[in-house]
Image (spheres, rainbow, N blue to C red):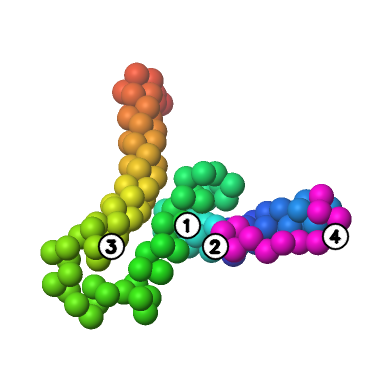
Amino acid sequence: MDETLQEEVHDLIADINKEVDSAGGIWEVDPSRLAACQLNILWASVGGYRFDPHSPEVKRHLELNSRVMESLGPKNMLAAFPFLKMLPVLSGYREHCEIQRDIREFMLVGTLTKLAAWILSLSVAHYFVLKFPFRN
């Protein structure tokens, strides 16, 4: 965990230095970049790998998360009036469900990709053990 945290902070500082150098000494704070660091640290402890913070998939995921947080905020009519789910277009319920589906797909694809790579590595190792057995 400490190594992941240090690596992420090092990458963030390197990105900030690049932006400061290219912008003439001014850094415009990008909240999505800071959120990508948090996502990477948490996901590295859960999933075992990091995302590229500049990838469009990560930016889309962070944008979806911010939209979910906005929809669950004080303007959320569905919390006060749950029967509005019956009017999905007017209440925004359909959009909320689409956002949740996109987030689940994003996480599932990342997890299944790593699982498939792990299974492939096991099958390759199994093949070599069968093909070239150890002899004394």
Do labels 2 and 1 touch, CB within 8 Å?
A: yes
User: Quick one: label 3 or label 2, which is nearer the N terminus?
Assistant: 2
Query: How busy is the neighbourhood of tag 1: few (under 14 within 10 Å), some, or many (20 plus)?
Result: some
First in sequence: mark 4 vs mark 1: 4
Q: CA distance from mark 3 to mark 4?
A: 42 Å
**For the magenta stretch, what is the residue range?**
22-33
**Residue 87 image point, x, y percent:** 17, 63
Q: What amino acid does circle 2 point to?
A: Ala
Q: What type is the residue that disc 1 sits on? A: Leu
Give the mark, 3 or 4, whose residue is nearer the N terminus: 4
Kindly identify which numbered label has been placed on residue 25. Answer: 4
Residue picked out by circle 1: 62
Q: Are marks 4 and 1 in contact (CB under 8 Å)?
A: no
Image side of residue 130 versus residue 53, left or right: left
127 to 12, vertically: above or below: above
| Cβ atoms at labels 3 and 1 below 8 Å apart | no
